[in-house]
């Protein structure tokens, strides 16, 4: 009887361990899937919004220059820096996601490397190329930091980016909404009220075109928007 009880005890113990192992694997898988989906939604929404902001800054560069700096001299620089906006937005988002996924050590390493690279580039480029060198440093720094961060995020979450709906279609929508707004306000006076109105018009055109291109739809857009901002 003691032998029988002993073998039953071992059997039950082994079964319990196997069940717990199976539960742990299942929970780990669900956890991974959840955070992969959340990460993809965050990246998609950030990309869609940042591309719109970039396009609006490019199209309305003259308006921003006149209203903020009271001169047209900054128009060229605003347009040059506008394409960098999506990378900056995404870099900040990815950095936050890495910290939330307990990857802050990697994030710190990338930021330290980025800072060191900037110091070296400033030393060599600024004296020779002045403002053009500074702009080049901004692009090089942001792009390298973003590449390193998104690479690590992809390794942690198996991130998959929908290039068509998250990048190409938003770029097309931004271009079309920008052209439409320029044609609509071709002889409009540059004022703060008009600038706000132009931004609203571009945004409305952008959403309409995005819905038309089926990059987003009403139900998923609203649900993802509120889900994203509840985090």
Image (cartoon, rainbow, N blue to C red):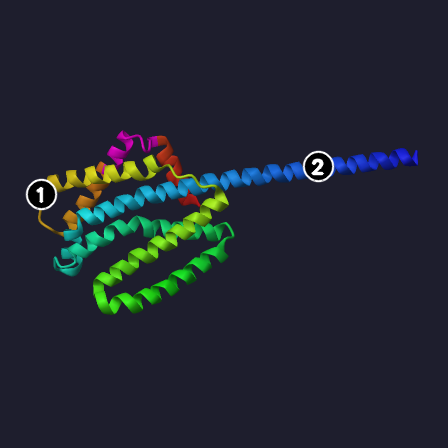
How many angstroms separate mark 1 from mark 2 (CA)? 71 Å
**Position of residue 148 in the picture relative to residue 55 (left or right):** right
Residue at 81% in and 37% down: 10
**Pointer 1 or 2: first along the chain:** 2
Mark 2 lies on a secondary structure that is helix
The answer to whether the residues at label 1 and label 2 have Cβ atoms under 8 Å apart is no
Instruction: Please tell me whether residue 140 is drawn above or below residue 17 in the rendered image.
Output: below
Residue 25 position within the rendered picture, expressed as x and y whole percent measured from the top left: 62, 38
Residue 127 position within the rendered picture, expressed as x and y whole percent measured from the top left: 24, 70
Residue located beneath label 2 in the image: 18
Does the magenta stretch mainly form a helix, a strand or a loop?
helix
Q: Residue furthest right?
A: 1
Residue located beneath label 1 in the image: 186
Residue at 26% in and 62% down: 134
Residue 40 position within the rendered picture, expressed as x and y whole percent measured from the top left: 42, 40
- Foreground: 129 or 181? 129
Q: Quadrant of the N terminus?
A: top right
**Residue 106 is a magenta residue:** no
**Position of residue 113 in the picture relative to residue 48 (left or right):** right
Residue at 42% in and 62% down: 112
**Position of residue 170 in the picture relative to residue 27 (left or right):** left
Residue 72 position within the rendered picture, expressed as x and y whole percent measured from the top left: 12, 57
Q: Which residues are magenta?
A: 206-218
Mark 1 lies on a secondary structure that is loop
């Amino acid at each position: 009887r003691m032998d029988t009880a002993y073998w039953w005890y071992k059997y039950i113990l082994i079964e319990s361990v196997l069940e717990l192992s199976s539960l742990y694997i299942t929970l780990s898988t669900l956890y991974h899937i959840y955070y992969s989906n959340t990460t993809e939604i965050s990246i998609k929404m950030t990309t869609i919004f940042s591309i719109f902001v970039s396009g609006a800054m490019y199209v309305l560069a003259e308006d921003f220059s006149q209203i903020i700096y009271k001169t047209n001299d900054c128009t060229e620089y605003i347009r040059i820096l506008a394409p960098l906006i999506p990378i900056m937005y995404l870099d900040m988002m990815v950095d936050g996601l890495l910290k939330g996924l307990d990857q802050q050590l990697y994030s710190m390493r990338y930021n330290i490397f980025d800072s060191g690279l900037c110091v070296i580039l400033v030393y060599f480029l600024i004296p020779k190329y002045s403002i053009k060198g500074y702009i080049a440093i901004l692009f090089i720094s942001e792009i390298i930091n973003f590449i390193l961060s998104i690479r690590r995020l992809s390794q942690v979450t198996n991130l998959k980016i929908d290039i068509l709906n998250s990048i190409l279609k938003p770029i097309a929508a931004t271009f079309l909404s920008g052209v439409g707004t320029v044609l609509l306000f071709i002889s409009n006076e540059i004022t703060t009220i008009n600038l706000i109105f132009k931004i609203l018009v571009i945004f409305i055109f952008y959403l309409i075109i995005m819905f038309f291109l089926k990059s987003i739809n009403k139900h998923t857009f609203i649900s993802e928007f509120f889900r994203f901002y509840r985090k």
